Structure formats: structure tokens, C-alpha cells
Image (cartoon, helix red, strand yellow):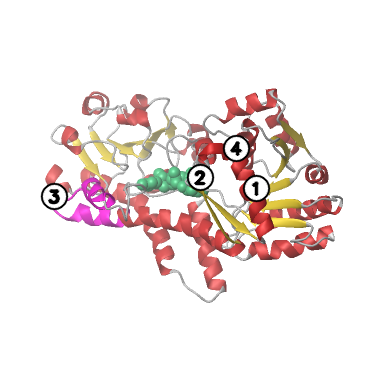
Amino acid sequence: MSKSTISIFGLGHVGLTFAVCLAHRGFQIIGYDIDEEKLQCIMSGKAPFYEANLDELLAAVIRMKRIQLTNNPQDAVSNSSITFVTVDTPIKPNGSVDLSSLAKALQAIGQGLRRKNNWHLVVIRSTVPPGTCLKVIKVLEEYSGKRAGADFGLCFNPEFLREGNAIEDIMNPDRIVIGEYDSMSGEALEEFYKQFHGEKLPLIIRTSLTNAEIIKYANNAFLAMKISFINMIANLCEKLPGADITEVAKGIGLDRRIGLSFLNAGVGWGGSCFLKDLKALIYVAKENGLDLPLVEATISINDEQPLKLIELARKLLGTLENKRIAVLGLAFKPGTDDMRNAPSIKIINKLLDEKARVVVYDPRALHNARKIFGDKIEYAVSSIQCIQGADCALIVTEWPEFKELKPEHFIKNMRTPCVIDGRRIYDPKEFEGKIKFAAIGLNQLKHE
Ligand code: UDX
């Protein structure tokens, strides 16, 4: 069966990675974005942002002529049978979601639908507050002059991509969630995914539009809650003689009802999605007269968590004034240069407040750190250069190269060898007795 032509509105992280994966598996793609510069960059075979393996795949599908880009949204709709909407839906300061990009895309799609004679499927993949898709139907009907169900279909199909793992997450998702306006829409999207995944079709869940919208938010809230939960227990472990969160997390994570993933204690979660989606969930609940105390606690625990590292530093060093502190890791997680909501930002700001001299290193994110901190801090080009002459080293992101560092490296290069492990990458037994060492979720009494 020949594969259909798919149009994709919005070529950011979600849209471009999806477009490239579809093209790689034989679909013809028409990509649309309002940003001309972005279109040109993509056409030259280079993604406008870093994502593992994306540039290679993009260059290959461009060579195979599987991706066309256009600045004419109506044409994109006319010449395809399914349109995925992957525009940005950022958060406003009051916690509500800014749906202006979605509104613009829907207007253009509606106008494109007006010109079409055959049934067309519109799939919203941007994260939107529950209830949005029911409003989308009306907007599309208004701009197209056509009827949902009869002339076009609508699905909400959330993505669950992790930055740095997006290609793998698209190619092999745990499940596919399809929220559908009617069964014809759901069936068309299920058929599309059957073509995309072939023999390795993941479990597909078909449900209402609103359920699928809630699933996306609740999914992120649950993951963030798991991390905040383990960080809360980690903070308790630090107070109790002989306690160590890594062993506690293993002990509970092996309960199959709980699971080991997302139980790594540390300086807290960051990134572009969790905080935005949790705040939006709280906002939607408030609009409906409900509080979500568990989600609120998830955020407030996380707000405090980066500062736990500073508390540990103070315990080992006393005052931080004029101490040279090496910060190893700036990105919100390894494998990315992204510093949005990164715990490193709070940690560095606090160190500066305490008048410490801060030197930082990250294998990918230094350029982003420069934009935030300018000349308030020093930038090193390697982990060894970063720790040289330092009074304390803070592990903030668990990059693999930091795991290679041994007590001897710290002893040889630091002024006073002292490590505070904010991501639990080191075995305390290897460090204790050799240098000053502390870690999130590790009781100090045992390891001093
Ligand atoms: C997340 C969701 O995983 C993804 O499904 C959603 O679509 C977007 O948000 P991402 O932000 O890329 O993805 O990062 P993720 O790998 O989930 O990590 C989020 C944060 O949690 C990172 O700061 C990470 O360091 C932290 N984390 C994760 C922990 O502190 N402990 C853990 O056990 C796991």
C-alpha cells in the first residue's frame, strides 16, 4: 500500500523530529512553519536545534526528496491527507497556556480545508489544556465552512518525547494515545500508525479528545511527582544515620507496582515541559474550582531541591564567601544543551548571592550559560580545568564523562578536595576517607 502524504504545521522540536521519522519510514512530508529562517536552515539539511541523530536522518530524507517545505499553509493541507499540528503552546505568566500559534495554524488549516473536496484528518499533537480540542472543532468548522465528522476528522494525539531521545521515542513508543472526535477519525489515525510501525505496532489506546488531553498532562505530572517524591525521601535520608537514598530507591522501585525509573534522587527536575505542564494543569483545575495539592507540592519540593546542594556545601566548607566552587554540569539533563529551568541556574545564582567564585563546565551547554551569566562566572573547557584550584566541586548534571572522575583526579587538581554529588553518580565507598564528600540523600554521619 502506498503511504499517504502528511503535512506538519510547526517544525520545532516535536514537529521536525516527527517529520523526519515519518519521512524515514517512507511517508511524503510537507512541512510548514511561519519562520522562513527555520525553513531555510532545515532545507540545508541542518536542524535548528540539537537532538541526537537528527541531523543525519534529516540530511538522508532530504536527499531522498521525502520532505518538501512550504510557506503556504493552504497548499500543505490541499496536497496531503493528514495534517499534524505541532506548533508551540507556551505558558503565560499566570499559568494559562498561550494558544495563539494554535489559533493561527487552525485558521490556515480551515482555509485549506475549504479548498478540499475529500475528507481530511486534522491531528493536534501540541500539548493543549483539556477542553481545547472541543473548541478546535468549532474553529475549523468556521474557517472551512465544512462539518466535522462529515467533511473532516479531528484527533488529539499527544507525544511523550524526551529531549535527546526523541527519535527513539517516536520510532518505539510505549503506547500511542488517540483521542478522537468520531470513530472515523480514530480509525484513520490508527491506520496511519499501522503503516508507520508495521509489524512492531505498539499498543494503541483510543479514547475521547478530552481524555487524551488529560493523559498528556497527568503523565508529566506523575513523572515529576515521582522525582519530587524520591527527592523528599532523599532529604529525610540525609537526617537519618546510615541512610542512603540510592538503596532506598532500589528497594521500593523493585516493587513492580512502583518501578525503578524516575526514582533517581538529585537536584531536581528541569527542562521545558514539566514545569509548564504542571502549572497549566493547576490552572485548568482552578478554572474548574479545584485545587491540585499533590501537583503543587511536586513543584514546591522541586523549587527547593537545587538549594539542598548549597546546604551540603555549607556544611562541609562553612562560609562560601570567596571559595572557588566548580560546577560540573549545566544542562537540565545529559545529552542536551538545554538549560531551560535547569537546577544549575538556581544553584549558580545562590552561589553568587553567597559571594562564592564560580567556575563552570558542561560538555554542551556552555554557550547557553554564557547568555545567562555573562562574565559573572568563569567558564572552563574541561572538567579537569574546572576543578583546578577549586575548594569544592558540585555535580549538577550526570554527564558520562563526570562519572569517569576518580577521587585521585579531585585530590590532584583541587585546592581542597571536596565533592558534593548532586546526581548520585559516585559510589560513596570509593570516596569516603579519601576526600571530603557529601551527596544528596546520603547521611553525613556515616561518611564524614
Ligand atoms: C519530559 C518527559 O519525560 C516527556 O515524556 C515529555 O514529553 C517532556 O518532558 P524531558 O523534559 O526531555 O522529557 O526530560 P526527562 O528525561 O523526562 O527528564 C526531566 C527531568 O527530570 C530532568 O531534569 C532529569 O534530570 C530529571 N530526572 C529524571 C530526575 O531528576 N530523576 C529521574 O529519576 C529522572
Drawn side of residue 291 relative to residue 246, left or right = right
Q: Earlier in the sequence, mark 1 or mark 3?
A: 1
Residue marked by disc 2: 202
Q: Earlier in the sequence, mark 2 or mark 1?
A: 1
Q: Position of residue 413 (x, y in %)?
A: 27, 25
Q: Residue at x 61, y 60 (%)?
A: 97
Under mark 4, the amino acid is Thr
Q: Which residues are magenta?
A: 231-254
- Horizontal and vertical percent position of residue 149: 74, 61
Q: Which residue is mark 3?
A: 242
Q: Secondary structure at mark 1?
A: loop
Q: Earlier in the sequence, mark 4 or mark 3?
A: 4
Distance (Cα) linking label 1 and label 4 = 11 Å
Q: Earlier in the sequence, mark 2 or mark 3?
A: 2
Q: Secondary structure at mark 3?
A: loop
Crowding at dot 1, Cα within 10 Å, few <14 / some 14-19 / many 20+, comes out as many
Crowding around mark 2 (Cα neighbors within 10 Å: few <14, some 14 to 19, many 20+) is some
